[in-house]
Amino acid sequence: MNVLAIETSCDDTAASVVRAPRQVLSEVVYSQSVHQRFGGVVPEWASRAHSEQIVPTVRAALHEAGVSRPDLVAVTSGPGLVGAVLVGLSYAKGAAIGWDVPLVAVHHLEGHLLSALLDDPAPSFPFLSLVVSGGHTTLYAARAVGQYEVHSTTVDDAVGEAFDKVARLLGLGYPGGPGVERLAREGRDTIPFPMPRPTGRPHDMSFSGLKSAVRQHIERYPGARPADVAASFQATVARYLALRVREAADRTGLDCIAIGGGAAANTTIREAIVGTGLRAFLPPRGRCTDNAAMIANVAIRRLEAGFGVSSFGVTAHTVPEVKG
Ligand code: KG4
Ligand code: ZN
């Protein structure tokens, strides 16, 4: 079975063909550059760029895979920017109707949560999965397909969001994560930033205090080397995440950790996760940032697990449930 997957929830227009169970035949990602001059994603521009790019992106994915008619269309139906999601979702519905094949609507976070399952070796259930994206930061215990317990979640900023905000403080462009990582390579982890625990919720995470500490440091020490600020911030985030992962492993007895989401592409974070001593499953970097192969993966895993296909009445608001 060949699955064509489409992902347009934010600022990447992505399409991929995956042959079940886990052979990725093609992966195409068009990253919209129009947002750079605004320092963040502008929803209206994202929708317009998706509309322009969706046809060439899907065509390229099918062509690269050597597939003219897939057996199923998988698509992100949320969460995300509604206008952006609707471009991919409407296109996917039209394509599935035209080919007369079923449609599977996928929750974007489940895509990140299970993305390590496309790799070889892949973790087997149950395992811990850390999703660190631009809008979400949550550590799950994945018990089975569709059964995800939240063990720790951010009470304020997501990790990717914190990287983006610190990038802005350092005068770097959007998206901030890759810029902070690049700058950090020239710096040293010398500034002891705090690792604040949310009051009353000791298992959870908080990143807005860390971002404020970075801002205060820059204001108080205008001569501070930006590269050292970047390196210290990044190392603090990595230590913080590794600590939460270790705690969750102790609480649950699970000894495998998978990661996903844009910030999981960060080398220091990846090294810290490996440093927990758990069995770490790190998808390739391009499979951590938004991509469509992870959406095909969820559709295949859900069908294997006995979940049905989706109704064509699915909208950008009827996000399939990811249980917390
Ligand atoms: O998963 P993703 O591509 O989109 C969302 O679902 O949000 O994540 C995007 C986020 C952005 O905040 C971006 O700055 C961050 O992931 N990111 C990184 C890196 N690459 C992307 N953060 C840290 N280091 C990176 N190398
Ligand atoms: Zn994402």
Image (cartoon, rainbow, N blue to C red):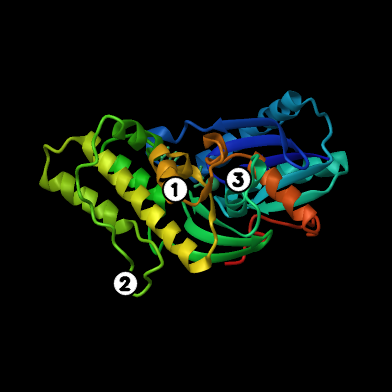
**Where does label 2 land, which residue?**
199
Nearer-the-camera pick, 245 or 262: 245
Please report contact status of discs 3 and 1: CB closer than 8 Å, yes or no.
no
The x, y position of residue 200, in whole percent, is: 35, 75
Q: Position of residue 74 (x, y in %)?
A: 73, 46
Q: What element carries label 3?
A: helix
Q: Residue 273 carries which label?
A: 1
> What amino acid type should be assigned to the residue bearing mark 3?
Ala
- Return the disc, 1 or 2, that comes first in the chain's sequence: 2
- State the residue at coordinates (80%, 55%): 309
Badge nearest the viewer, 3 or 2: 3
Quarter of the picture containing the C terminus is: bottom right
User: Exactly how many numbered labels are in the figure?
Assistant: 3
Task: Name the amino acid type tagged 2.
Answer: Thr
Vertical placement of residue 67 versus 256, above or below: above
Residue at mark 1 to residue at mark 2: CA–CA distance:
25 Å
**In the image shown, does 305 or 92 lie closer to the viewer?**
305
